[in-house]
Every structure is written in structure tokens, then in C-alpha cells.
Amino acid sequence: MSAHLPITLSVNGEELTRRVEPRETLADFLRRDLGLTGTHAGCEMGACGACLVMLDGLPVHACLIFAVQAAGATIQTVEGLTESAAIADLQSVFHTRNALQCGFCTPGMLVAAHGLLSRCAMPSREEIRDALSGNYCRCTGYEAIVDAIETVARRRAGEAASSMAEEPA
């Protein structure tokens, strides 16, 4: 019987303290212990991107991190990003551009897109493809996903430009 270790971390804005097994992955902790099933368990080798979450503002593969390694960290899952409306425009455009099909990879794609757009407001199509290179999709062929992310980046840039133009001098 393995000893459980206490960890404290923030998940989707809520400070939590839990006891975890030393070898429990962050993905398993989020899914089993917290019921956040938007973090999918795919390859469990960090190759498919289905388990992506934001850890201290960066997208990471939750299947490659032990929950104990996330102690003290701030985690945002696709559920938290949805609840805060941080990815509402991405979700809408993914839907209208048909950038999702079976939906298994979609949470990871949305987290990857959010991570990219958080650090680069107007990425090139090559930068978008590079940011998605750790995400595997068997259904869409990626072009619609790249189109959707590019569309959101352009819309956000347009909104930022128009709000700056409306500010008094």
C-alpha cells in the first residue's frame, strides 16, 4: 500500500488540498479525484495532446506530470476555461468552422489554441500548426482547426484595435 501525500493547488480558481498517490498523474487526479473529465486520457505518453491543461499559464500534458509535481501550481482545465469564458470565442468558431468532429481531441486543441493566443496575439498559420503539433486528431485533417484559430486571432485583433480607437485621447 502506497502512502498518500498531501498537495495544495488551485484548480479552475478554487484552492484545493487533497491526498494523492505519489505516482498518480495530474490527468488521473483531475479526472478521477475532481471529476474534470474534459482532460482526456489518450496515449498517456504526451504525444496526442488530449490531456492538455494550463499549468501556471502554460499548456502542458497532464499525463506526463505527477499530481504531486503540481503542488502549489495554478491549473486551468477546459472546464475552467469554459466557465470563465476565456475560450468562448474559440468554441464558437470551432463549431461554425466545423473544426471538430468526434470531439475527443477538441479540449486539448482548445487548450493549445488558448495557450498560443495568450502568448502570441496574431500567430501565423505556421505558428498555429506548430502550436498544434503536439495534438493528434483522427477526424478533421487540421485545416479547419487552423482556420478557426486564425479567425479568432483576427477577430480579437480587430476588437482590440477598435476598442483602442474608441478610447479618448
Image (cartoon, rainbow, N blue to C red):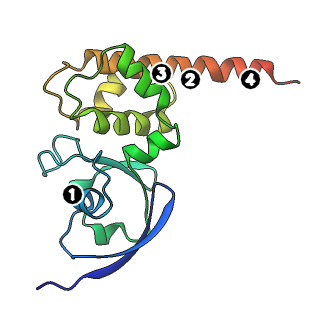
Whether residue 124 is visible, yes or no, is no
The alpha-carbon separation of the residues under discs 1 and 3 comes to: 29 Å
Between 28 and 161, the residue placed more toward the observer is 28
Tell me the tag on residue 120: none
For the residues labelled 1 and 3, say whether their Cβ atoms are less than 8 Å apart: no
**Which amino acid, mark 2?**
Arg
| Label 3 secondary element | helix
Label 4 Cα crowd, 10 Å radius (few <14 / some 14-19 / many 20+)? few
Of the image marks 1 and 3, the number of the one nearer the N terminus = 1
Tell me the tag on residue 64: 1
The alpha-carbon separation of the residues under discs 4 and 2 comes to: 12 Å
- Residue shown at the point (30%, 19%) measured from the top left: 99
Between 117 and 103, the residue placed more toward the observer is 103
Q: Which residue is mark 4?
A: 164
The alpha-carbon separation of the residues under discs 1 and 2 comes to: 32 Å
Q: Position of residue 132 (x, y in %)?
A: 28, 32
Q: Position of residue 142 (x, y in %)?
A: 24, 20
- Residue shown at the point (32%, 52%) measured from the top left: 36
Q: Which residue is mark 3?
A: 152
Which quadrant, please, contains the C terminus?
top right
Query: For the residues carrying marks 4 and 3, which lies nearer the camera in this image?
Result: 3
Q: Which residue is mark 2?
A: 156
For the residues labelled 4 and 1, say whether their Cβ atoms are less than 8 Å apart: no
For the residues labelled 4 and 2, say whether their Cβ atoms are less than 8 Å apart: no
Using the rendered view, name the quadrant where residue 68 is placed: bottom left
The alpha-carbon separation of the residues under discs 4 and 1 comes to: 41 Å
Of the image marks 4 and 1, the number of the one nearer the N terminus = 1
